[in-house]
Amino acid sequence: MRRRSELQQRLAAAETLTQAGEELEVLTQMARDGDEGVDTELAGALKRFSPELDRIELEAKMTGDHDTSNAFVEIHELLVNPPLVEGSLQRSKIKNEFDSTVNTFIEGISSL
């Protein structure tokens, strides 16, 4: 029963990939031909398919012999290693500053 479920999930993923590929191919060709308004449709299609494609990609990367088995994972490193926590907070601060700089830059360009 488990094997059947796995195969059904793989078939559904393959159908999603096929549908996304076909739709994006058509929209890309329309964009090359200079059709107006296709940019919005292409952006919408990418936004619609992205979460599913990300899930399929992650699933493909994480596939292994024991993936269907149950497992327990315990993480203690952050609790016993304060420098690791501080490093994580520092990376988060740098990322937030970068995001802010990029947003300011984009706003500046948009106002031109």
Image (spheres, grey):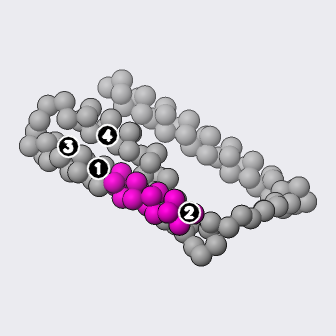
Mark 2, secondary structure of its residue:
loop
Gap between marks 3 and 1 measured at Cα: 12 Å
| Furthest residue toward front | 1
| Residue located beneath label 4 in the image | 45
| Residue located beneath label 2 in the image | 1
Examine the rendering and report whether any part of residue 83 can be seen.
no
Q: Residue at x 11, y 35 (%)?
A: 35
Marks 1 and 4 in Cβ contact (< 8 Å)? no
Marks 2 and 4 in Cβ contact (< 8 Å)? no
| Residue located beneath label 3 in the image | 27
Magenta span: predominant SS is helix
Residue in the foreground of this view, choosing between 82 and 103: 82
Q: Which residues are magenta?
A: 1-17
Residue type at mark 3 is Leu
| Residue located beneath label 1 in the image | 19
Marks 2 and 1 in Cβ contact (< 8 Å)? no
Gap between marks 3 and 4 measured at Cα: 9 Å
x, y percentage for residue 82? 87, 56
Q: Residue at x 74, y 64 (%)?
A: 71
Residue type at mark 1 is Gln
Which numbered circle lies on residue 10?
Answer: none
Marks 3 and 4 in Cβ contact (< 8 Å)? yes
The residue mark sitting in front, 3 or 1, is: 1
- Which of the two discs, 3 and 1, labels the residue nearer the N terminus? 1
- Which of the two discs, 3 and 2, labels the residue nearer the N terminus? 2
Residue type at mark 4 is Ala
